[in-house]
Image (spheres, coloured by chain):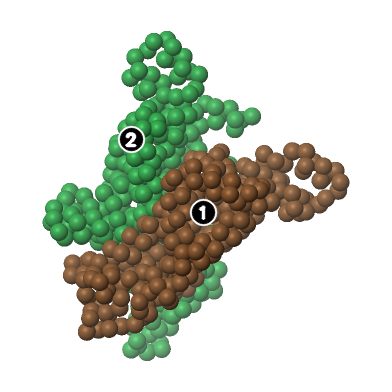
Amino acid sequence: MKKVLIGIPVVFFVSLFIFLLMQMMPGDPIRLIAGERVTPQRIEELRRSWGLDQPIYVQYFYWLSHVMVGDFGFSYVTRLPVSILVWSRLPYTIELTLTSLALSYVLGIPIGVIAALKRGTFLDDATIGLSTFFYSMPTYWLGLMLMLTFGLYLRWFPVSGASGFESMTLPTLTLTLPYVAMSGRIVRTEMLDVLTEDYVRTAWAKGLPSRRVILRHALRNALIPLTVMFFLDLPWIIGGAVIVETVFAWPGMGSLLYKSVVRQDYPVVQAIVIIIAILTVVCNILGDIVSAFLDPRIRVEKEA
Amino acid sequence: MKAMGVEETVPKEVERKSMFKLTKLKEFCLLLLHYKMSCIGLLVVIGITILATFAPIIAPKHFAKTDVPNKLQPPSLTYLFGTDVLGRDVFSRVVYGAQIALWVGLIVVLVQASIGITLGVMAGYFNGKLDKIISAFADIVWSFPPVVLALGIVMVLGPGITQVVIAIALTSWPTFTRVTRAKVQSMVNREFVLAARAVGESDLSIMLRYLLPNITSTNLVLATLTLPAAIISTTALSFLGFGAQPPTPDWGAMLSEGASQLVIAPWIATFPGIFIVITALGFNLLGDGLRDLLDPKLRV
């Protein structure tokens, strides 16, 4: 619950920070909307109709009260409501990030378990080596290289756009590979910890079949940190999606953010940054709740 | 030239060594040798440092020297990594790029370490409410994606490497806070701190003179491990076109120029990327080794 108390001011602070930053922006947004050849009267008129003649704090509270009900104003470039723009892009980002996360767990968990069981062998070293390798690789470069190999030379998959399953392959792969390595490594470390615990030793001593000991006794507890990491990583992977979406021209929220920064379309940028800030806080709170729910020890610790 | 390079980097190790209370440099090197991968990492780091330091000597051409008649040449003996759209030598640009990568990485790490360590020492020393606020705040900032904040800042202040450095440092300090806090908490009730307090040392003096020296080695390990992440994030923003501006031979900016030529001239995008990976890998391997050596508890 502490997180909620800290989280609300953080979101508020981010919104204020972003708002003030945007105010410091060089250039007059009215010029952007109206173009160069307009009369001063027309500019005044526009300024009033967009509420830009009010003092800054009035503008901020006006804007904040609208943001709270999901109204982010209008895009300066397309003149569409920002919420419609963002909502239309959101499903693509969710599709991409959740598929990547799911896939990285499906691959990463078995890899981590096997590496932990075969500790010190080639398999284990390879897991660690590969995870360090992918950790050291910038996603955008990985994306470009996958694009070059599978898109341009082998022509197996389309390199950009979002026309069905095939065009999703390369962006998903780009986001997934580093996370496979990371989740594999986390599972491995946790498994190594858990495997030396008394209750696992007891399970072995009782003569339970090894499959049951590994899956039911050890893995279940080793997965708790990974579950919590899911919530903490979600904002990060969406941040990573900004780059991947831009590289592959995937029509998600990330490429919208990129495009809006280039076009200086600040209502859209404000909206996306704040949505991600809220998401970050919510994920943090969920992470705390889930970890307390899964691990009674944490609950006790907090109450004490 | 190699001997000079070793001299360049060895004093740094000597400095660190004295902080780790390892009396002999030889002992340290022997221990490090024990870790084969970390040795490779150390060699890579030394290599990149040499590359950056002696860039004007190593690079056959200046990074901004254009030669349009020879544009888009594939890699050959004359042009080791080929040439780009303006006929600039990609190899020379990659070599000069090492300077930028290392500087930027170092500055980002210094900024985030100073924010992170300050907050961490405070949280660990003054337990209670302040600790809870700082920790919760650090948790939240930690999961906020740096690229998103960087895009927000860059939109207002315009593109540039300084803006990117600020944005990345502002979002990535919490790792330092967490580690420092835990370390300080474990020391706060030890005899030497209690003794200092009994003698009448002020809080500030205890933090600076008694606690800070004891968390240096841990934070050095952390710095080595954060540097590659800093390089990757900053080059990512340069790749998007918001960081270093042309003709700066930033590896990320080179990649973005190369991305548009991916079909005709894939080498422009390939080589800077390989160097980012090698550099990041070198620091990560070295950091892993240093951690096992100095602070095994930090292992994730």
Q: Colour of chain B?
A: brown
Give the quadrant of residue A107.
Answer: top left
Residue of label 2: A123
Q: Amino acid at mark 2?
A: Leu
Chain in green in the render: A
What is the CA distance from the residue labelled 1 to the residue labelled 2?
27 Å
Q: Position of residue A68 (x, y in %)?
A: 46, 55
Residue located 50% across and 64% down the image: B3
Q: Is residue A225 above or below residue B14?
A: above
- Which residue reaches farthest right? B199
Look at the image and tell me whether residue B141 can be seen: no
Is residue B136 rendered to the left or right of residue A121?
right
Is residue A197 rendered to the left or right of residue A100?
right
Q: Nearer the viewer, residue B216 or A22?
A: B216
User: Are there few (<14), some (14-19), or many (20+) residues within 10 Å of tag 1?
Assistant: many
Q: Amino acid at mark 1?
A: Thr
Local secondary structure at mark 2: helix
Is residue A258 rendered to the left or right of residue B71?
right
Q: Nearer the viewer, residue B64 or B232?
A: B64
Give the quadrant of residue A37.
Answer: bottom left
Residue located 25% across and 58% down the image: A145
Local secondary structure at mark 1: helix
Q: Position of residue A254 (x, y in %)?
A: 33, 58
Q: Is residue B256 above or below residue B221?
A: below
Q: Disc 2 sits on a residue from what chain? A: A
Q: Nearer the viewer, residue A109 or B95?
A: B95
Q: Disc 1 sits on a residue from what chain? A: B
Q: Is residue B291 above or below residue B238?
A: above
Look at the image and tell me whether residue B202 can be seen: yes
Residue of label 1: B224
